[in-house]
Image: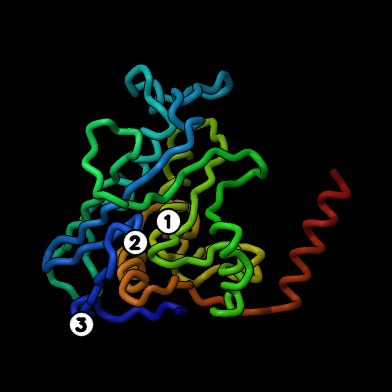
Amino acid sequence: MFYKLKPFADSVFNIAYKRPESVPVRIDVSDKVITITGYVEFDPKLLVPFKKSEKINDALLSSKPEGYTYADAAIEGICENWGKSYLFEGATEPVKVNVNLIRKDDPDAVIPEGQRFFKVRHTNISGTSFVTSPIWRMGWGFFLTGCPEAAMINWSPRHPGTINMNDYGRLSSFKQVVAHEFGHVLGLGDAYDAHYRFYYEAPGTDSYIMNNNSSVNAREVEMALRAHETGKMQYFPYKISLRKYFGRLFSKFTRRIIK
């Protein structure tokens, strides 16, 4: 489950789903095309027009048509970030990734009978966005994997988790964050120095979408493929340093007292 990179050209991804309609996000692999198909259900609070901030001159949002919603932004953010061509390790030609997201609220959508959806909800309970598993799947994932991340996201293809999106003043920020959270839905762990990673940043991932919401790397696509092949979430390696961990906790505690 701790991901190890090997040449894509030497990899064979045998991805198959016993009951495809029970899997909200599916991946199909051919020689030069990878297709990600997802069925998504949006919180009604995300079906309203994206709110323009009075404090920020958002040129990107201003370029959007009237009635452009948070759900529209989420679809764009995911498709623009994940749907592109990648040159994988060991490959001589780029491989195209197509992302097709079918919305439950789309009256023209063709949805298979019994199809399950992953959900995108609005939240303001914290200052961040996050993905969670259903309550009945929380906690025990840690004992299966040994990874602290699995306590909140006990991932499987059938249960990829729910995206909880916070408010963002800039459209670009919202789109990049939702693309990061979709990475969790695909089966990827975080790469940045989060407290549940013992404040350890995965080396060489500073430009990854799973680190600082920058851009999707070919390695991250390969991790998603491996997750769907094995049915297990793929984690970036981390190191445990109790000195660093408690040092960061103490630093945060003292900053709160000073404030």
Residue at coordinates 38% horizontally, 73% vertically from top-left?
Answer: 231
Image quadrant in which the N terminus is located = bottom left
State which quadrant residue 132 falls in.
bottom right
Q: CA distance from mark 2 to mark 3?
A: 18 Å
Q: Is residue 220 above or below residue 90?
A: above
Q: CA distance from mark 2 to mark 1?
A: 7 Å
Residue at coordinates 35% horizontally, 78% vertically from top-left?
Answer: 5
What residue is pinned by disc 3?
Answer: 10
**Amino acid at the residue labelled 1:** Ile
**Amino acid at the residue labelled 3:** Asp
Q: Would residue 243 appear left or right of 232 to someone viewing this image?
A: right
Secondary structure of residue under mark 3: helix
Q: Which label sits on residue 88?
A: none
What residue is pinned by disc 2?
Answer: 217
Q: CA distance from mark 3 to mark 1?
A: 24 Å
* Crowding near the residue tagged with mark 1, few <14, some 14–19, many ≥20 C-alpha atoms within 10 Å: many
Q: Is residue 54 above or below residue 43?
A: above
Image quadrant in which the C terminus is located = top right
Q: Position of residue 179 (x, y in %)?
A: 41, 49
Residue at coordinates 40% horizontally, 34% vertically from top-left?
Answer: 71
What residue is pinned by disc 1?
Answer: 209
Q: Would residue 257 appear left or right of 252 to someone viewing this image?
A: right
